[in-house]
Every structure is written in C-alpha cells, then in structure tokens.
Image (tube, rainbow, N blue to C red):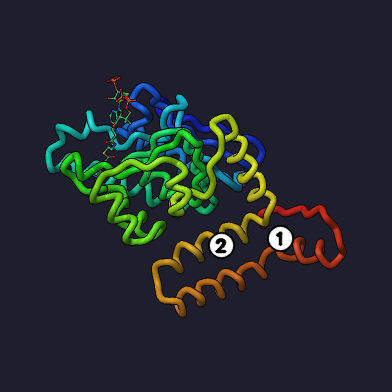
Amino acid sequence: MELKNVLLEKEENIAVVTINRPKALNALNSDTLKELEWVIADLEEDDSIYAVILTGAGGKAFVAGADITEMKDLNALQGRKFSILGNRVFRRLELLEKPVIAAIPGFALGGGCELAMACDIRIASEKAKFGQPETGLGITPGFGGTQRLARIVGMGRAKELIYTGSVIKADEAYRIGLVNKVTTVEELMNEAKAMASAIAKQAPIAVKLSKAAINRGMQVDIDTALSYEAEAFGECFSTEDQKEGMTAFVEKKSEKNFQNK
Ligand code: DAK
C-alpha cells in the first residue's frame, strides 16, 4: 500500500508510526484509518519489532479527532461503515502483540484521545490537550471513548469529561492518570524512545504475554484473570528467553541475549 497519511519508520527493534496530516491536525479520515490498519498488519508480522511509538506530525496535534469534514455529510450506511472501520483499527492496535506508546505532542481530542487510549502507555508534552468533545457535535464518543476512558481514569472523571466536553491540559491528564508521564516538547520523542528501548531490552515473549494477560484480565473477574496469568506464566517456560534470563541471573551475567524465541 502507498502510505500518504501515515509514516512508518523502523530502527533496531522499535517502530515509529506517525499520523501525517498536519494541515488537518492529523484528523482521522477513512484513508488514514485504512493506512493505519495496513501499518498495524505489517507490525503484527514483523518479529524484529519489540515496541511501537505512535505519534502525530507537525508539532501541534497528536490527532484532533475523526475528520469532521468527512463525517459531516455521511449517510447512515456510510456512518456504519466508518464506525466498523474505526473500531476494527483501534481494537487491532489495542491487541497488537507488542507494546504501543502514544507520544502526544499536542491536541488529542475525540478520536485522537481514543486512539491514545487504545495504546498501552501515554507520554504527553506539556503542550498536550485532551478531551472528548463529541457531545458538543451531537454525537457520542465512537471509537471506544465511553469504555476505555472510564477504565483508565474511573467512571466519575470519564463522565465529567464526556458530559461537559471539556478539554484538559497535560498536567491535569497526568493528575487523573490519563497519561503516564509529561515531558517538555523537545524531550517528548527522546522520552518515548527511551521507554521503548527499555521495553525492547526485556524478553519480548514475556512482554507480549504480560500485555495480553493485563488486557484480558481487566475485562473479567479476578479468578478468571489470575487463570490468564497462570497460563501466560506457564507459557514462558517453553521459551528459550526464559532459560536465557534466569541463567544470566544465576551466572551473574549482566548481558542477556534474548532471541524472541
Ligand atoms: N476534522 C477535520 N479537520 C480538522 C479537525 C477535525 N477533527 N480538527 C482540526 N481540523 C482542521 C481545521 O478545520 C483547520 O483546517 P483549515 O481550516 O486550515 O483547512 C486545521 O485543522 C487547523 O485547525 P484550526 O484552524 O481549528 O486550529 P486551531 O488552533 O484554531 O484549533 C483545535 C485547534 C484542535 C482546538 C480545533 O481545530 C478543533 O476544535 N478541532 C476539532 C476538535 C474536535 O472536536 N475533535 C473531535 C472530533 S469528533 C465514530 C467514531 C469516532 C468518532 C466519530 C464517529 N463512529 C464510530 C462512527 C469520533 C469523533 C471525533 O473525533
């Protein structure tokens, strides 16, 4: 696929995916969502990539939402198609078997905030702004906002943000647990890359299984969740990387040579 609205760069074991429509503040139209889906499929297949950073081009926005210009005149059938596409892409990102860090330089509104929430970890620049302004447009959040926001910041805060459509700054987003870290604008990508490198140094299968256990476990009761953890833990003992990690500890070697096997 020819990529116009999404950039994909790979360096060592880290991929950087950039939503690249800066003139429209990286708003998500159908073409961008289709390209993003293609990129996710590529990353799913690429065993050399251990962590992913998702960001937005231009410095002003991560993603300023779904593309209102495109959405404005949709009929019911087109709206349904758009919804199915968006939900499929966001869910596929959430289920990607490698951690995804959202590096958020500026606006993360509506679908942009929802995209960040489909990632595992969010790092924001001090200029970033977050919100779900959909109710002011006459719609509900449609890419998972009503569900993921409540799971991340709790029901009361999610309801306040969604009912009022208010936009919050990075420090408030950090205070309520919507973002993991706030950095200067200049340091944003370095911080995201440092975290991605720290992740990429761990045993990739153990990281992948931890992600699946956390994500699946959050949806079910604690006993079922702990059985997912036991499954994941057991599976690690069929990997070469478990032998490598534990042998290195016992032999007091600081270097570990994880092979993703
Ligand atoms: N869509 C399309 N274009 C957008 C856009 C958006 N969401 N946000 C900004 N732009 C465009 C502007 O139209 C403008 O284009 P030109 O006029 O230059 O051609 C350019 O980006 C620069 O924006 P501004 O001139 O407005 O820049 P400002 O600094 O003055 O303001 C802003 C920045 C972020 C405060 C403002 O642009 C803004 O309020 N943008 C809209 C934010 C918003 O309301 N986002 C939520 C969109 S609703 C669904 C699933 C999900 C969704 C819907 C359906 N289904 C399942 C069916 C999601 C909905 C949303 O995300």
> Which residue is painted at 18% across and 45% down in the image?
139
Ligand 1 is found in the corner quadrant, namely top left
Check whether the beta carbons of the residues at disc 1 and disc 2 lie within 8 A of each other.
no
**CA neighbours of label 1 inside 10 A, class few (<14), some (14 to 19), many (20+):** many
Q: Quadrant of residue 6?
A: top left
Q: Compared with residue 176, is residue 130 higher up or lower down, i.e. above or below? A: above
* Amino acid type indicated by mark 1: Asp
- Viewed as shown, does residue 32 lie left or right of 50? left
Q: Position of residue 95 (x, y in %)?
A: 45, 54
**CA neighbours of label 2 inside 10 A, class few (<14), some (14 to 19), many (20+):** many
Q: Position of residue 105 (x, y in %)?
A: 47, 33
User: Would you name the residue on which mark 2 appears?
Assistant: 209
* Amino acid type indicated by mark 2: Leu
Q: Quadrant of the C terminus?
A: bottom right
> Which residue is painted at 61% across and 48% down in the image?
50
Q: Position of residue 152 (x, y in %)?
A: 41, 57
- Viewed as shown, does residue 261 lie left or right of 182? right
Q: What element does badge 1 sit on?
A: helix
- Viewed as shown, does residue 150 lie left or right of 47? left
> Which residue is painted at 52% across and 43% down in the image?
123
Q: What element does badge 2 sit on?
A: helix
User: Would you name the residue on which mark 1 appears?
Assistant: 241
Q: What label sits on residue 116 in the rendered view?
A: none
Q: Compared with residue 247, is residue 170 higher up or lower down, i.e. above or below? A: above
Q: Position of residue 213 (x, y in %)?
A: 51, 66
Q: Quadrant of residue 1?
A: top left
Q: Compared with residue 232, is residue 119 higher up or lower down, i.e. above or below? A: above
Judging depth in this view, the residue of 21 and 174 nearest the camera is 174
